[in-house]
Image (cartoon, rainbow, N blue to C red):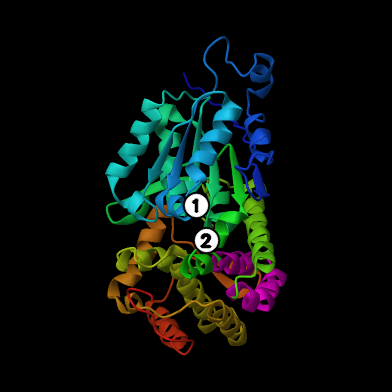
Amino acid sequence: MRCHGPIDVHFDHRVFFTRGVFEPGNGVLEDVLSGGADSTRDRASGGRQDGHSAHRGVVFIDDGVARAHPGLEAAARAKLGGLLGVDVPVRVVPGGERVKNDPSHLDDILRAIHDAHLCRHSYVFAVGGGAVLDAVGYAAAIAHRGVRLVRFPTTTLSQDDSGVGVKNGVNAFGKKNFLGVFAPPCAVINDTDFLKTLDDRDWRAGFSEAVKVALVRDGSFFDEIERLAPAIVRREMGPAVRVIERSALLHFRHIVEGGDPFETAEARPLDFGHWSAHKLEQLSGFELRHGEAVAGGGALDAMYSALAGGLPMGEAERVAACLVSLGFELDHPSLDDPALLDGLEEFREHLGGRLTVSLLAGIGSAVDVHEMDADLVRESIDTLRAFGPRGTDENK
């Protein structure tokens, strides 16, 4: 006997932009928590599930965010507890790659989910940068084979790219996101007030992903980033949020309209510049921020595109100049490490199938290639050294 049939699973992907999400007058969370798959049944039963306890939840907050916003824990507990009708515990977790590198942190998150007696209709609320969202999202996805996740990205990078996506994971064996799952969140809530307390390095980091998506999807957006770069460096919220929202929308559309949200095909246009970026992070001991590595990797692949004859050199120089104008250093000691080229095979292995790297045919237009010339990669690195000062392992 042989059985064969399609399995179609429907997800609603929802992204909200707001300010003061945990303030009493903000209604976004009420919309989110009343919009789940069981909302009609739950509201008819006064928030109860077939006579059992109301939805439970647990909040995980990035330790850096908790320090920058001293009243956040109490505000989140009060707001969510009021909406769910139960006490909602709050846990503070390490921020940055620490939470993804040390397996004990994943165990702690899973233990908190267990101790809160969450079920598959309960909620995990993740408040933090991309690494915290990755790790907490992974825990939520594997607990009971999936607990509802609500993300609150707090950095420019997580609001304009990673937090809008459907990937979750942690690092293992020295490799980025070796353990992970595709699991769409119940909702993503981008509260732009969180961005005001970022240090300059984390503020800057997310705009490399905006440049990336503009390069492969929308040339007019790249023009806008070039124009707004001085205002972004001055941390003017209006222009910055405009760029973050447009980047988030392009990433969102790729996920919901691109036909491959779980990346089963070979092409990964939104991973432009990432084969070297992931390796640069690893070679720097993860001291290099992801956004900083993406800036270097994107500039490298733009220059490679030009030297390979697919992109006018003037366009590659525009890419490098734009990134420098945003405050990025495009050179780094790890670019000289012979192990950098190992990133190509690691990238292929992580994505599956044959090597597929997106390069540029023009600003706003990507083309896929299936091999990279090592000598041309080195020449691209040497050419980039003309753009700005050399970084350090501390990237000060």
Query: Could you tell me residue 261's position as x and y percent?
Result: 57, 46
| Residue that label 1 marks | 69
Q: Pinpoint residue 216: horizontal percent, then vertical percent.
A: 61, 66
Q: Does the magenta stretch mainly form a helix, a strand or a loop?
A: helix
> Which segment is the magenta one?
207-233
Which residue: 57% across, 23% down?
85
Q: As drawn, is 27 to the left or to the right of 337?
A: right
Amino acid type assigned to the residue bearing label 1 in the image: His
At a point 52% along the width and 58% down the height, the residue shown is 155
Q: Which numbered tag is attached to residue 197?
A: 2
Q: For the residues marked 2 and 1, what is the alpha-carbon distance in whole angstroms?
A: 8 Å
Secondary structure at badge 2 equals helix
User: Who is closer to the viewer here, 102 or 234?
Assistant: 234
Q: Position of residue 352 (x, y in %)?
A: 43, 52
- Magenta-drawn stretch contains 341: no
Examine the structure image and report whether residue 230 is included in the region drawn in magenta: yes
- Residue at image coords 41%, 58%: 348
In contact (CB < 8 Å): disc 2 and disc 1: yes
Residue at 34 percent of width and 41 percent of height: 106
